[in-house]
Image (spheres, grey):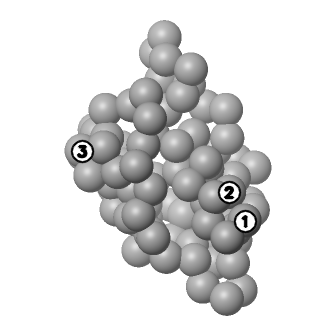
Amino acid sequence: MTYKTKGVCSQAIYFDVDEDHKVHNVQFEGGCNGNTKGIAALVEGMDANEVINRLEGIQCGFKNTSCPDQLSQALKQALNQ
């Protein structure tokens, strides 16, 4: 799935959610390279709802969102489709 981010440095997030709601293959387009690779590695194989619970609401500096928060929004959208 592709999710176009809003309010952060990265422009998009690419990821898969399998039939068991496990998160795989997360890749961020843009953003802080090391941080987004770290997030992707940490959430690999995790349950999507657990990722949402852990990352939703995280802010970056003075922004109301962050790359982790945007991933949580992307996963919420994917689970609702």
Q: Is residue 45 visible?
A: no
Q: Quadrant of residue 21?
A: bottom right
Q: Which mark is residue 39?
A: none
**26 over 55 or under it: above or below:** below
Amino acid type, residue under disc 3 in the picture: Gly
Residue 26 placement (x, y as % from top left): 42, 66
Alpha carbon separation for disc pair 3 and 2: 21 Å
Residue 27 placement (x, y as % from top left): 34, 62
| 65 on left or right of 34 | right
- Check whether the beta carbons of the residues at disc 1 and disc 2 lie within 8 A of each other: yes
Q: Which residue is mark 1?
A: 80
| 2 on left or right of 29 | right
**70 over 37 or under it: above or below:** above
Residue 15 placement (x, y as % from top left): 44, 69
Q: Residue at x 41, y 74 (%)?
A: 25
Alpha carbon separation for disc pair 1 and 2: 6 Å
**42 over 70 or under it: above or below:** below
**Which structural element holds mark 1?**
loop
Q: Residue at x 39, y 31 (%)?
A: 8
Q: Which mark is residue 76?
A: 2
The quadrant the C terminus occupies is bottom right
Residue 11 placement (x, y as % from top left): 30, 43
Q: Residues within 10 Å of mark 2 (few under 14, many from 20)?
A: some
Q: Nearer the viewer, mark 1 or mark 2?
A: 1
